[in-house]
Image (tube, helix red, strand yellow):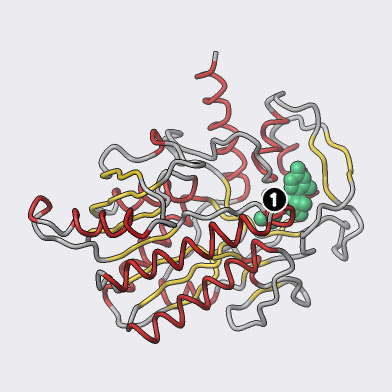
Amino acid sequence: MKILVVGGAGYIGSHTVYELIRAGHEVVVLDNLATGRRDAVHPDARFYWGDIRNGRDITRVFDIESSAEFKNKPIEVVMHFAAKLIVPESVSQPLAYYENNVEGVRTLLEAMVDRDIKRLVFSSTAAVYGELEGGICREDDLTCPINPYGETKLACEKMIQWVSAAHDMQYCIFRYFNVAGADASLAIGLDKDNLTHIIPLVMQTALGLRDKFYIFGSDYDTPDGTCVRDYIHVTDLAQAHVLGADYLLKTSDSLIANLGSGDGYSVKQVLDAAQGLFEVPFEYAPRRPGDPARLIANTTRVHEMLGWHPQLSLTDILKSDYDFRRKLMQKEV
Ligand code: UDP
């Protein structure tokens, strides 16, 4: 099928493009390259520069792709990855998050309604849950975000549901837990300046690019006092999107599903796992604003509805991120 990946030059978008192409789909990418990289786009995908906050950039792609030049074959599914996703940044710049994340999705939906494109796979987040008692998140649980990032994604989820009801649109909303790792080819991975996520920072420390790794907070209500998260390899996550697109095409239903491993690891446990492989100097530091204590996925729904089971472990995630970063360093010398 022909799929438009909005934000396909970014980290999760580029990995999803790789998996869609491996599954035999025709892939079109729209990206403004604000944080994405042109060279992260799979060579077999067609690339368009554009910004989803500008409706004409989107309708132009829909129109070109459904023209005779491309055998009058319209885009069947849109996947949306073009969002800002750094929790502490969202706390300090909430308006930028509303503008990019919420306005971007509103414009995208408007263009889809205008051109009668009826299927959307949307990247949401575990941050929509906030501080749930026990930290195990089920899709039907109360959503009560504690940071602007989660709020903007929840606003988008609701907007998509209202638009779906009004315009007969199908959606697959995936709530991601903590995504990390790199494609097995090491051609793509999380390659950005100003990294903030735990696994790349631990690995940069292991590679000597940072003096120390700082654990943010040791007084949370968790067994070792550090925050607990559910880590999922980006390739497993990307493969779930292939199944999500198939689901939309083969059924007339919509779906909201968590994408995680179902296992929780504390920041200290992640560090211990990394230290089993590499040397990683560390120090405790104060809490970071906006961090819930525990976020772990209940994954029953995605197993039942899509038959998806992650294949890669925390060790696989750590090793692949390390290998990708080491390769980047070799390229730079
Ligand atoms: N974290 C940390 N040190 C760092 C980066 C992150 O202790 O240098 C912690 C962070 O406070 C949180 C967990 O690691 O408890 C996961 O944070 P990350 O930014 O990777 O993902 P998030 O859960 O915020 O999406």
Q: Residue at x 75, y 65 (%)?
A: 294
* Position in image of residue 240 (x %, y %): 43, 62
* Position in image of residue 39 (x %, y %): 39, 33
* Position in image of residue 291 (x %, y %): 77, 59
**Left or right position of 23 against 121:** left
- Within the image, what quadrant is residue 132 found in? bottom right
Relative to 264, say whether 204 is above or below. above
Of the 4 image quadrants, the one containing the C terminus is top right
**Left or right position of 126 against 241:** right
Residues 291 and 200: in front is 291
Relative to 252, say whether 8 is above or below. above
Where does label 1 land, which residue? 89
Q: Is residue 249 at all visible to an observer of this figure?
A: yes
- Within the image, what quadrant is residue 53 found in? bottom left
* Position in image of residue 78 (x %, y %): 34, 63
**Left or right position of 209 against 163:** right
